[in-house]
Every structure is written in C-alpha cells, then in structure tokens.
Image (tube, rainbow, N blue to C red):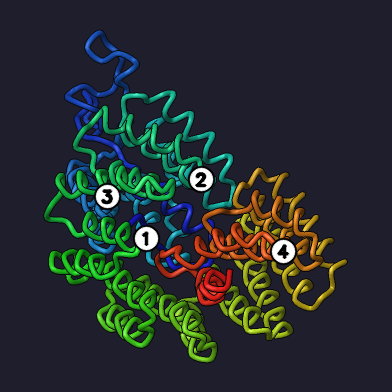
C-alpha cells in the first residue's frame, strides 16, 4: 500500500504520500561533505554529467550519518516506517544539523505532533542543505501547511533542476497523484523507471494510479514487477492484495496479505487489509478482531491509532454506532495523553462525522467546533489554522443541511468554495462541489446535483452514492444502478465515507 496514516487531518495524509520515498543518492564531494548523485560524480555539470543527468545531492558532515540515512531510506521506501525511523534517529544523533534526516523523521512520524516537530527542524536546518534538498523540504512544508498548489510548484521546480533524479520525478508524480491527475502521475513514474529500472516505489504507485483508472491489467503488471524487484519485502504483496480486494477477489487478497505478514509479522498495513476484506464480506466481528491484533502488537502510537480508526470504520459499516464512537474516543484519549492537538482535532472530526451520520446533529456540531478550537489554540502554523477555519464551513454546511436549513447550508457552501479557490486547494474545491451537490439533491434539483457531484471527488464513494440518488430522482434507473454499484463495490481500505454508504448503496443497486 502507499503510506497510510489514519489521521483525519487530510494534510498529513497528503504530506506523507508526497514525501515518503523522497530521498537522495550517495557519493563524496572533494570538500569532505557527504553528497549524493547518480554516480561517482558530485552533481557538477561536466561533459560526462550533463544537465539532463543532474541529481539531488545529499548533504551531511558525517560519513556515519550518511550511511545510516541510506540504510533508513531503504527501509522507509518499502513502507517500513518504524524501522526506518529508528535509523534516522541515529543519523540525527551522528549529525544534528542533518536537515534531510529530520525531513525523513517527519515523513515517517507516527503522530501529527512528531511530524510538525521534525518538519520545523528540517526547515530550520535547510540553509545547510543542497538546493535540491531545500526544494524537497519546501514541498513538505507547503503540504504540511495545507498549500498543495505551492507544493506542486516546488515539485515541478525540483524536476526542472534535477531531471536525472528518479526520486524527483517520483515526487512530482505523487504530487499529481494527490491531485487525481492520474495520467501525469503515471508519466512521471515512468520517467523514474527510465532513469532507474530498479526503483521499485515507482512501480508501486503506478499500480495504484492504473487501479484508479480501472486499468486493472496494467495495475497487476506494475504490482507484479514490484514483487519481482523486491520479493523479500512485505509491501509489494500488500499492494497487490489491495488490487485484488478492489476487484472483489477477497480470499485471494487475504492470501497476499498473509504473504506480507509472513515476511514481516509487524507489517500492520496488511493486518488492516485482512480486516477490511472481512468487513467487505460482512464479517464485521472478525474484521474488528483482526484490527485488534494490530493494536495488541503495536510498536508505536501510529499502529494504535490505525487499529482504533479501522475498528471505528468497521463498526460504522456494520451499523454499530455506539461501538464505533467508543473506538474513536479511545483514539482521542490516546492523542490527548501525548498533547497532540492536531491528531486530537482529527479525532474530534472523526467523532463528529459518525454522530452526523447517525442523525445526532447537535452533538456533531459541538464536536466539529471542538475540532476547530483545538487547531486554533494550538502552536500550529497560521496556514494550518486558516485551513481549519475553511474546513469548518464545510462541516457547518453539512450540519445545516442535516437540520433542513438550506439557506445557511448554501451560505456555508459558498464561503467554502470561495476560500478553496483562493487557496488553490483542489481537494477542498472538490469538497465544495460535493456540498453544493448534496444541497441540490435535498432540493430535488437533480440535474444541478449531478453536475455539481460530477465535479466532486470521484474517489469518494459518498459522492458516487449521492449521484446515484440524483439519477434515481430523475427516474434514470440505469444510471442510478451504475453509480450505486460503483459506490457499493468501491472496495478500499478503511474509509469513513465508504462505511456510511456501502450498505445503502448495495440496497439501491439491488432495487434499481
């Protein structure tokens, strides 16, 4: 699977996806500072090293730190975040001014609090880093501050200045991936592979991009190549299992997840993959028990949070709101014990969403407000706080809509849309269309609903389900069945909107 953080803070998930495999290469400069390049050269343009082969240099004053970094990078690139994190901590101990080691500690962090702490260190030390490293840190900082458009610009600059670096292309491809520009993402991953045919991470996310485009044969070829390149690592089997789950081959998917666990019993992503397959087979108790295994064997709070989040989603999917809320409250308590305001805010948002879906509107509104207040009172950046205020319009609009207050819902939707446009945030722009589509659906303006929802996030099963309802309202049973089927059979890892609509979409599919 790609890097997964079960935080409700979308910016953190995006940051991790964008930067997990971002790294540099190794060589040695004449000055004695350890640097990185594609070969024995240091990155200076020569006849043997033209501009087209320029790569990002790795900067550290310590040979020991450099070796540790490369060892940690190899682990992190295969989604072994906990193992990589331990090595990056050693690299920082060997060279406290090593900006990229702090960068990687942010990327592999188990909590939001640690993410922002190490990001701050990486930014503070970036003046000691090479130009390419500075751009990579700027990408992480931009996305960490909910500025994905700015992050994309830095990724494009990185590739323009270091076109011979496979990880630069990977980073740009993953920026496109986050914007759901799948074809551009695939193109950049292919460029990564053309530079380094053994760069396994590019095959991984290329497989996910093909999967999203429903080009399942291409996705399978990419994942099988990924397995071929690193057959003794768990993540290739985990990724292939996710494809099998997507296309409804649940038992085969579980077998691949078990293969991953046989290689690394601590690879928690696969434990959650098995739990999800069981949920999709309506074996909710078995799925919850499988997720509990991850919690019981957790190596850090990241594992614990992932297990609790997965159990919440499984219980929501099974119609057990009380049990789902109990798991979400445990997650909140865990983050409160660490004083992690960002994750606490995400937990409050999770609880609010479960309450809203259960029709407990007033309670949901209080949780949404609490989520916002946690960010506003935190030490997080002004940009993060502004983004949280913007997100509040989306939540307030949904609460108003649930209450039947259409006028307020429209006002909040307009405020959300204008703010999203101003920040050039594609994720939130799509969310604004979703909210406007839901409002139009409530008003039985079915054509408007279909148009607005069509501009929403097509990777959100809830958007697909609302679209099915709009077509049903129009009397177009064929289209209603098509979209209901897409929503019902979306088959992804724990995703709260999917849990909200899966059973309802299945009923609508059967009735259409």
Q: Which residue is mark 4?
A: 438
Please tell me which residue is depicted at 23% across the width and 31% down the height of the picture.
Answer: 196
Please tell me which residue is depicted at 22% across the width and 54% down the height of the picture.
Answer: 236
Q: Nearer the viewer, mark 4 or mark 2?
A: 4
Q: Residues within 10 Å of mark 3 (few under 14, many from 20)?
A: many
Residue 308 drawn at (x, y percent): 41, 80
Q: Is residue 4 left or right of residue 403?
A: left
How far apart are the two marked residues, 4 and 3, measured between alpha carbons? 39 Å
How far apart are the two marked residues, 2 and 3, measured between alpha carbons? 22 Å
Q: Is any atom of residue 97 visible in this view?
A: no
Q: Is residue 512 left or right of residue 446?
A: left
Sequence order check: which comes first, mark 3 or mark 1? Answer: 3
Sequence order check: which comes first, mark 2 or mark 3? Answer: 3
As helix, strand or loop, the secondary structure at mark 2 comes to loop
As helix, strand or loop, the secondary structure at mark 4 comes to helix
Asked whether the beta carbons under mark 4 and mark 3 sit within 8 Å of each other, the answer is no
Quadrant including the C terminus: bottom right
Q: Residues within 10 Å of mark 1 (few under 14, many from 20)?
A: many
Image height check: is 144 above or below 317?
A: above
Sequence order check: which comes first, mark 4 or mark 2? Answer: 2
Q: Which residue is mark 1?
A: 246
Asked whether the beta carbons under mark 1 and mark 2 sit within 8 Å of each other, the answer is no
Residue 300 drawn at (x, y percent): 32, 73
Q: Which residue is mark 3?
A: 77
Residue 8 drawn at (x, y percent): 52, 67
Q: Is residue 122 left or right of residue 343?
A: left
Sequence order check: which comes first, mark 4 or mark 1? Answer: 1
How far apart are the two marked residues, 1 and 2, measured between alpha carbons? 18 Å
Q: Nearer the viewer, mark 3 or mark 1?
A: 1
* Of the pair 403 and 252, the residue shown nearer to us: 252
Please tell me which residue is depicted at 42% across the width and 23% down the height of the picture.
Answer: 161
Sequence order check: which comes first, mark 1 or mark 2? Answer: 2
């Amino acid at each position: 699977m790609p890097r997964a953080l079960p935080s409700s803070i979308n910016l953190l998930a995006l940051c991790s996806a964008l930067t997990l495999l971002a790294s540099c290469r190794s060589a040695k400069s004449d000055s004695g500072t350890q640097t990185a390049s594609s070969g024995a050269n240091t990155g200076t343009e020569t006849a043997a090293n033209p501009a087209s082969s320029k790569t990002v240099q790795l900067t550290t004053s310590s040979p020991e730190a450099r070796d540790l970094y490369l060892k940690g990078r190899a682990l992190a690139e295969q989604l072994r975040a906990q193992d990589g994190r331990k090595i990056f901590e050693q690299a920082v101990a060997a060279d406290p001014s090593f900006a990229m080691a702090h960068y990687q500690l942010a990327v592999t962090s188990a909590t939001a609090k640690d993410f922002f702490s190490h990001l701050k260190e990486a930014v503070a030390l970036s003046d000691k880093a090479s130009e390419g490293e500075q751009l990579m840190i700027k990408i992480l900082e931009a996305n960490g501050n909910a500025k994905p458009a700015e992050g994309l610009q830095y990724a494009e600059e990185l590739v323009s200045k270091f076109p011979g670096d496979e990880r630069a292309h990977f980073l740009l491809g993953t920026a496109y991936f986050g914007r759901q520009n799948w074809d551009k993402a695939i193109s950049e991953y292919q460029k990564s592979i053309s530079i380094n045919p053994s760069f396994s991470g590019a095959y991984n996310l290329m497989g996910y991009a093909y999967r999203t485009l429903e080009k399942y044969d291409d996705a399978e070829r990419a994942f099988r190549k990924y397995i071929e390149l690193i057959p003794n690592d768990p993540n290739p089997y985990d990724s292939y299992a996710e494809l099998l789950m997507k296309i409804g081959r649940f038992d085969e998917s579980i077998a691949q997840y078990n293969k991953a666990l046989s290689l690394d019993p601590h690879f928690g992503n696969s434990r959650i993959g098995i739990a999800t397959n069981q949920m999709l087979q309506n074996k909710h108790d078995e799925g919850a028990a499988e997720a509990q295994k991850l919690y019981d064997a957790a190596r850090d709070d990241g594992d614990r949070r992932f297990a609790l989040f997965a159990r919440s989603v499984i219980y929501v999917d099974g119609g057990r709101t009380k049990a789902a809320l109990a798991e979400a409250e445990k997650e909140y308590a865990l983050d409160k014990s660490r004083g992690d305001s960002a994750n606490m805010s995400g937990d409050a948002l999770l609880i609010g969403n479960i309450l809203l879906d259960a029709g407990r509107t007033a309670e949901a509104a209080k949780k949404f407000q609490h989520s916002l207040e946690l960010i506003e009172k935190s030490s997080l950046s002004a940009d993060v706080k502004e983004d949280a205020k913007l997100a509040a319009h989306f939540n307030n609009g949904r609460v108003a809509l649930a209450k039947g207050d259409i006028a307020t819902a429209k006002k909040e939707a307009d405020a959300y849309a204008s703010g999203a446009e101003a920040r050039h945030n594609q994720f939130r722009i799509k969310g604004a269309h979703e909210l406007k589509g839901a409002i139009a659906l409530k008003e039985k303006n079915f054509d408007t609903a279909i148009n607005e929802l069509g501009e929403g996030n097509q990777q959100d099963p809830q958007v697909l389900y609302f679209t099915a309802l709009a077509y049903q309202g129009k009397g177009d049973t064929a289209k209603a069945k098509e979209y209901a089927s897409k929503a019902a059979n979306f088959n992804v890892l724990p995703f709260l909107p999917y849990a909200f609509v899966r059973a309802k979409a299945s009923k609508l599919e059967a009735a259409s």
